Image: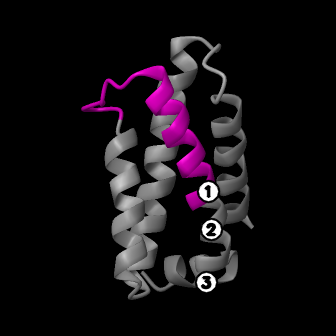
Amino acid sequence: MWPTGIRIANIAMLILAIPPLLPYGYYTLLRIITCGVTALLGYLLFKANNTGWAVCFMLFAVVYNPILPFHLGKGIWVLLNIATIVILGMSFRLMPSKIICQSIKSR
């Protein structure tokens, strides 16, 4: 199912970004994708009445937003990437793909 694939791809991209060796364009693409994924998960969690986790995911969406980017040091971004990997990994327990698909269909 597509929600699982998107989360796995995002986690893989975040893992690749841990050693800060890639070109700047990769990190811009990573911001766009991570912002979108975390915002979508935050919205779906809010819709499922899981407000605490929804706020957590929305905060990650704000940090990764590409429009008004935060300019943080490489070390802080590495820590944020690791925290995002953990949070996205937890999303598989918080919102299995079946629940996400049901939430999207009920819009």
According to the picture, the residue beneath numbered tag 1 turns out to be: 86
Q: Is disc 1 surrounded by few (<14), some (14 to 19) or many (20+) residues within 10 Å? A: few
Q: CA distance from mark 3 to mark 1?
A: 20 Å
Pointers 1 and 2 in contact (C-beta within 8 Å): yes
Q: CA distance from mark 1 to mark 2?
A: 6 Å
Q: Is disc 2 surrounded by few (<14), some (14 to 19) or many (20+) residues within 10 Å? A: few
According to the picture, the residue beneath numbered tag 3 turns out to be: 99
User: Image quarter for residue 67?
Assistant: top left
Residue found at x 24% / y 32%: 68
Assign the C terminus to one quadrant of the image. bottom left
- The kind of residue tagged 1 is Val
78 is within the stretch colored magenta: yes
According to the picture, the residue beneath numbered tag 2 turns out to be: 90
- The kind of residue tagged 2 is Met
Q: Which residues are magenta?
A: 66-87
User: In the displayed structure, does residue 61 sit left or right of residue 14?
Assistant: left
- The kind of residue tagged 3 is Ile
